[in-house]
Amino acid sequence: DIQMTQSPSAMSASVGDRVTITCRASQGFGNYIAWFQQKPGKVPQRLIYLTSNLQGGVPSRFSGSGSGTEFTLTISSLQPEDFATYYCLQHNSFPLTFGQGTRLEIK
Amino acid sequence: EVQLVQSGGGLVQPGGSLRLSCEASGFMITTYWMTWVRQAPGKGLEWVATMNKNGVDKDYVDSVKGRFTISRDSAQNSLYLQMNNLRAEDTAMYYCASQFGSPVHYWGQGNLVTVSS
């Protein structure tokens, strides 16, 4: 099974900051990584698919990169609506596994 | 409008059964891998089960193997999750979702399942 270790688990940042969230996989694989944003009481929303492809309608300040065992989600300039919880997902092999989540809070 | 509309869920006693439904509109579920994901109260997302677009290949998280069954009805354009022998630890919001690697991707609105006596 591929374990996904997401870091940090929580962080505080200010509007305008650049933020990076990392997921490290227990074994290397291709580009089958997706990133999701979830706000309290809401359905998760996909931001990035296949490591670096931006979901339609998602602002370009979100980007994804990585390969092998390390994958990152970057928010280039935080906006007030970006404060939420973020998850990575590997769908390279079963069982599919999510990272533990990163709660992004306002500083 | 393209959407996934869920139904089912509710309160059930330990050992009981429930069936969740996920009806697609605006696209055919037979053209995508389809998945169930759950989220226990205050916890993160957990993958539960996936069905291949062929409708034959299915995979499950270990904790539900032998108790949950993912299925679909092409005529109804609907995905199902039959949950038997439910346990307290199955209490969660359950979501259906379409193929994670496709350019288009949808989630249902979620169904709360509560297992309690």
Image (cartoon, grey):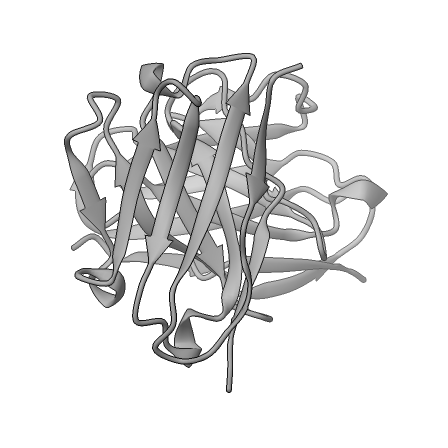
Where B42 sits versus A80, above or below? below
- Kindly give the residue lying farthest to the bottom in the view shown: B117
Q: Nearer the viewer, residue A70 or B2?
A: B2
Q: Nearer the viewer, residue A44 or A10?
A: A44
B114 relative position to B70: left or right: right
The percent position of residue A61, horizontal first and vertical second, equals 67, 27
Which residue is found at the position 51% from the left and 65% from the top?
B92
Q: Nearer the viewer, residue A19 or B19?
A: B19
> How many numbered discs?
0
Which residue is found at the position 44% from the left and 23% from the top?
B76
A88 relative position to B67: left or right: right
The percent position of residue A53, horizontal first and vertical second, equals 47, 20
Where B57 sits versus B15, above or below? above
The percent position of residue A55, horizontal first and vertical second, equals 56, 21
Which residue is found at the position 80% from the left and 52% from the top?
A14
Q: Quadrant of residue A5?
A: bottom left
For the C terminus of chain A, the quadrant is bottom right
For the N terminus of chain A, the quadrant is bottom left
Q: Quadrant of residue B98?
A: top left
Q: In this rendering, does residue A97 appear at all?
A: no
Which residue is found at the position 15% from the left and 30% from the top?
B56
Q: Nearer the viewer, residue A98 or A15?
A: A98
Q: In this rendering, does residue B80 appear at all?
A: yes
The percent position of residue B52, horizontal first and vertical second, equals 23, 28
Where B39 sits versus A90, above or below? below
